[in-house]
Amino acid sequence: MGSSPRIALDAMGGDVGPAVLVAGAALAFQRRDDLRFLLFGDEGAIRAELAAHPELASVCEVVHCDDVIAGTEKPSQAIRRAKTTSMGQAVAAVKDGRADAAVSGGNTGALMAMAKLALRTLPGIDRPALAALLPTLGDNDIVMLDLGANTEADTRNLIQFAVMGAAYARVILELERPRVQLLNIGTEELKGTDELKDAATALRAATALPMQFDGFVEGDKIARGDVDVVVTDGFSGNIALKTAEGTARFVTDLLKRAFTSSVRSKIGFLISRPATELLKHHLDPNNHNGAVFLGLNGLVVKSHGNATAKGVANAIRVAARMVREELTRKIMDDLDRFPSDHIRGSGAK
Amino acid sequence: MGSSPRIALDAMGGDVGPAVLVAGAALAFQRRDDLRFLLFGDEGAIRAELAAHPELASVCEVVHCDDVIAGTEKPSQAIRRAKTTSMGQAVAAVKDGRADAAVSGGNTGALMAMAKLALRTLPGIDRPALAALLPTLGDNDIVMLDLGANTEADTRNLIQFAVMGAAYARVILELERPRVQLLNIGTEELKGTDELKDAATALRAATALPMQFDGFVEGDKIARGDVDVVVTDGFSGNIALKTAEGTARFVTDLLKRAFTSSVRSKIGFLISRPATELLKHHLDPNNHNGAVFLGLNGLVVKSHGNATAKGVANAIRVAARMVREELTRKIMDDLDRFPSDHIRGSGAK
């Protein structure tokens, strides 16, 4: 590992193909020129894009793949085709040690299934989780997980998600002791499922870990900036994430409608345009791009399917930062420090 | 029942006390003068407020209660004090047939516990659900349930919630065949828990009911106006509702911050003020006030604790409409028409 992260890029994943992915890699490389790339996909199409970025081209190896995983493909079907596809080969490169992290903008379910099958879970982790960054009113983004890798989560899963999410927040948000909370339907200790209550008890006792466990958080407090890591099962996490996205779009759509409803407000809108641009910037998913599968023997980042070059560059930066900061080692260390038997599988220790 | 709904009003519930609740009743009475009220609480305080509304006073009976349920009181503790409190007596009036529906702005958990204990579930209903109206980009609000009456929901619960939510939408949104969807983490039939998949199968087969079952909906599609009733377990529903509230506040806070960030945008904001007032109106919870406990032998409406008089009036209108339209009978009829054994408890039929 060390200082030259090698990124395996699925150049075909996403809604727009190699043009955006190569442009994203070029942007990331402009900022950090120690990056190295393995690009997987249609060689002709990739080389055509690289022609416009000669400096990037000098640190890229292109690996031709015949096939692409479709956005609609079922994970069970996709894993059978892994070997011939750009996504499957990008993940395999991480497994083989030819790359330090994989980045793909393709089918999330397929990527997760391939990553799980090829890389397997870390010792001490029962199930991987999907984590992402969300914007807040505070100075920092927050980390939220699981966002849909698992439909249900038991007490052990929730504890492991908390440990992994805190390690991720230390690396990506550069926090020494991230504040961790469990998503619940109330903040009193009596609220919620037994799994949540038991996970809270265990996390409260884990004072030696580099995190500060602050009990429960409700859905309306996520974006306030009072918490750094929000831990939940994949069902609730997915519902919360998508409801937040939908509501943000709903409010901005209402706003657009309101601003175009009269000449007077149209003029007001034009005058205050810099202000609304600021709003747009803050809510733009490309500024928070890069969901991460945590808990595997290898780093895999999911970029938004419709990310811009800037979004792809952000996903690559997230991947590179996890490599540089040795996220996997940090997670393993924290698991070792956990004071109970909630972490290790019965056969693992 | 018929045309003169008698509303039992907990005049002490909520953050501001009798002043707002009496003013709300007066507003509702202005619109529909066939309403009749039973007001429960501190008789002196209530009569002082009624003095300003002589017309309302002529259709009100005041019942003095010594005690009030505190906002922080645990439900288990509150039900032991039901008899002496304004909330408990309002619910008891529905049970005794002295009122057709109860409205309270007090402690939600306590109200739910009292209502369940006093009124019991309808035959054929295993568990009541908390339903509310949410704003959308479409012409209508949507109904969402359960919002937290139950932490978990099995297949039977989900089906019953769907039937009750559809009946409520027919009454409140005046739709003949409301479009019903189950909240899930994907729209494919394979997605989600077994409970969701089994409920979807049963609802798809229930073609004789006055609803149109449209499968699954994801969190980001709730506010689009493509669905009328969103059905979910109380945990996910509560998370979704609160996340939506928090996100709407987050975006409007960002907007405020953006608009006050420069003189130019401040001027723009002032010019476009009518537009932002429209936005505020659309998002104001007082325009959607009144969550309902469905599935009990009696109608109970929970008003927001910090509702304005307009909000209280809306909650009263919701209660009166359920009485006039005989919601409980409609739910019973629909349960009878359900083509499977998913509805009736083993001992109920």
Image: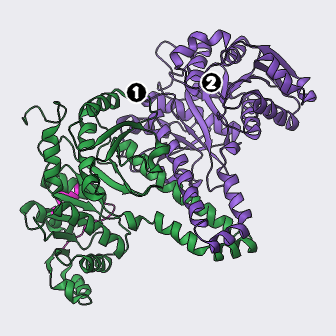
Chain colours: A green, B purple
Q: Closest to the observer: A107 or A158?
A: A158
The image shows residue A109, relative to residue A4, as above or below, that is: above
For the residue marked with disc 2, what is the amino acid? Answer: Met
**What is the chain letter for disc 1?**
A
Element under disc 2: helix
Image coordinates of residue A187 in percent, x first then y, are 44, 33
The image shows residue A243, relative to residue B307, as above or below, that is: below
Q: Disc number at residue B332?
A: 2
Image coordinates of residue A20 in percent, x first then y, are 32, 77
Q: Quadrant for residue A62, please give it.
A: bottom left
Q: Quadrant for residue B113, please give it.
A: top right
Over which residues does the magenta segment extend?
A66-82
Would residue B104 appear left or right of A186 to someone viewing this image? right
Is B188 within the magenta? no
Whether labels 2 and 1 belong to a single chain: the reply is no
Which residue is at 30% across, 72% downward? A313
Neighbor class of circle 1 (other Cα within 10 Å; few <14, some 14-19, many 20+) is: few
Image coordinates of residue A237 in percent, x first then y, are 38, 46
Is A75 within the magenta? yes
For the residue marked with disc 1, what is the amino acid? Answer: Glu
**What is the chain letter for disc 2?**
B
Q: Where's the N terminus of chain B, which quadrant? A: top right
Residue for badge 1: A189
Q: Is residue B175 visible?
A: no
Element under disc 1: loop
The image shows residue A108, relative to residue A348, as above or below, that is: below
Which residue is at 38% across, 57% downward? A141
Which residue is at 71% across, 64% downward? B275
Image coordinates of residue B261 in percent, x first then y, are 57, 67
Would residue B220 appear left or right of B224 to someone viewing this image? left
Would residue B254 appear left or right of A189 to someone viewing this image? right
